[in-house]
Image (cartoon, rainbow, N blue to C red):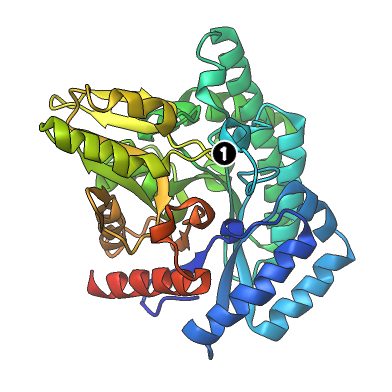
């Protein structure tokens, strides 16, 4: 839905919150949830969809089904302006963990999948609007930390594969006038996980390596190739992920802009945050409060911050919890997407304030107009945090709209 401001922000939620990888399951969820949300939130206005397509669904949607879907969108007064192309395969009701990064950007399967998404989004995107496809932060860092040569090989291959996608979207832009971009999504333990690593990747790999490839493939100058890459490869700024990294939104926005890096999509999500008490008994209570979040489906990376600002990473909450009672850190932040309308939960808190800061920042820094709510963990939340899903999604929209109006 379009937020009624002079800046024309578009707000949606990511349909990755709904289980189902096959197109039939995806479409059933759209019919069940999106049409009802539109009726409740924007009955007289077009309503945007943040569409998540697994590879199996994308393969089905390439053919005649795409035309049928376009007709349905028109009939329902819906539009698609962003896709989630991060999870390639299964994302619910199974152990996902580090396999969410497979295949990574060094693999042909990732390139082929993303090109399918490009074709779909080019067909669905309304005229006069740019569209983004969010994707993984290249690869999973722990797979590569022990082998520098392998890490550099992945960075090189990822740069070339991203440039190959840019060649396709540049052709689409020339042919149709539609601007599409691939939005890399940094997160804890991703191969690029924070602002500095994003900038280094663009400077050291994407622009030089991808620039050479794109210049040769399109028959353009290296300078033009780099400009093209910066137009079509952007960042998906997930407020949960950057909060877990203890990064200040205004600083990150400024550093990206200084480097010529654009933000293609902002995902509105909140992490679990806790200030570690000195009292041993209260520490034990914090452990018990966190324990239900140490579930087996997704990775829930933890970053602790000491008084001097030093950061220490744990690969998953389940492996971090045994260290909490002896930790000398001041604060823990956990990559677990909790409802964005919750600020406090027993002894725990969320990083909701970072979302507020980003929404406030967008009033003066027009870095991005695409906003996507992404609380995908409804199935694995502690039981007392679960309420009716449709009501929960509606409440998240209403919280964003009220917060945006108040900033």
Q: Position of residue 303 (x, y in %)?
A: 32, 31
Q: Is residue 250 visible?
A: yes
User: Which residue position holds label 1?
Assistant: 136
- Position above or below: 279 against 326: below
Q: Quadrant of residue 241?
A: top left
- Position above or below: 361 against 38: above
Q: Is residue 42 visible?
A: no
Most distant residue in the right direction: 64
Q: Quadrant of residue 364?
A: bottom left
Q: Nearer the viewer, residue 58 or 202?
A: 58
Horizontal side of residue 110 vs 369, given as left or right: right
Q: Nearer the viewer, residue 358 or 24?
A: 24
Q: Position of residue 22 (x, y in %)?
A: 77, 56
Q: Nearer the viewer, residue 146 or 148?
A: 146
Query: Who's the residue at 26% across and 58% down the image?
Result: 343
Q: Quadrant of the C terminus?
A: bottom left
- Graded by Cα atoms within 10 Å as few (under 14), some (14 to 19) or many (20 or more), the crowding at tag 1 reads many
Most distant residue in the bottom direction: 44
Q: How many marks?
A: 1
Q: Position of residue 222 (x, y in %)?
A: 59, 31
Most distant residue in the left direction: 279
Query: Who's the residue at 63% across and 46% down the image?
Result: 91
Report helix, strand or loop for mark 1.
loop
Query: Who's the residue at 47% across and 82% down the image?
Result: 41
Horizontal side of residue 290 vs 35, given as left or right: left
Q: Position of residue 107 (x, y in %)?
A: 72, 28
């Amino acid at each position: 839905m379009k937020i009624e401001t002079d800046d024309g922000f578009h707000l949606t939620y990511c349909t990755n919150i709904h289980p189902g990888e096959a197109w039939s399951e995806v479409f059933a969820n759209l019919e069940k949830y999106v049409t009802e949300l539109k009726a409740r939130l924007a009955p007289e206005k077009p309503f945007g969809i943040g569409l998540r397509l697994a590879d199996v669904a994308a393969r089905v949607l390439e053919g005649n089904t795409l035309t049928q879907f376009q007709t349905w969108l028109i009939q329902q007064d819906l539009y698609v302006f962003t896709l989630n192309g991060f999870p390639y395969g299964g994302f619910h009701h199974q152990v996902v963990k580090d396999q969410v990064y497979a295949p990574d950007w060094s693999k042909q399967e990732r390139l082929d999948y993303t090109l399918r998404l490009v074709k779909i989004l080019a067909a669905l995107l309304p005229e006069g609007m740019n569209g983004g496809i969010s994707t993984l932060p290249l690869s999973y860092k722990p797979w590569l930390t022990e082998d520098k040569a392998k890490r550099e090989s992945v960075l090189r291959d990822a740069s070339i594969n991203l440039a190959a996608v840019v060649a396709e979207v540049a052709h689409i832009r020339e042919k149709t006038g539609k601007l599409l971009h691939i939005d890399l999504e940094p997160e804890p333990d991703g191969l690029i996980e924070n602002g500095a690593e994003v900038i280094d990747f663009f400077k050291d790999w994407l622009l030089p390596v991808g620039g050479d490839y794109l210049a040769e493939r399109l028959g353009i100058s290296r300078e033009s190739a780099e400009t093209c890459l910066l137009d079509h490869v952007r960042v998906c700024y997930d407020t949960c992920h950057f909060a877990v990294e203890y990064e200040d939104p205004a600083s990150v926005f400024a550093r990206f802009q200084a480097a010529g890096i654009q933000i293609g999509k902002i995902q509105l999500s909140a992490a679990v945050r806790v200030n570690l008490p000195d009292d041993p008994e209260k520490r034990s209570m914090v452990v018990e409060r966190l324990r239900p979040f140490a579930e087996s489906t997704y990775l829930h990376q933890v970053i602790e911050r000491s008084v001097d600002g030093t950061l220490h990473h744990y690969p998953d909450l389940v492996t971090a919890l045994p260290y909490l009672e002896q930790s000398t850190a001041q604060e823990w932040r956990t990559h677990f997407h909790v409802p964005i309308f919750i600020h406090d939960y027993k002894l725990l808190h969320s990083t909701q304030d970072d979302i507020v800061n980003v929404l406030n920042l967008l009033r003066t820094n027009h870095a991005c107009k695409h906003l996507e709510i992404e609380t995908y963990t409804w199935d694995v939340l502690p039981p007392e945090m679960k309420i009716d899903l449709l009501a929960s999604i509606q409440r998240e929209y209403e919280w964003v709209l009220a917060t945006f109006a108040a900033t």
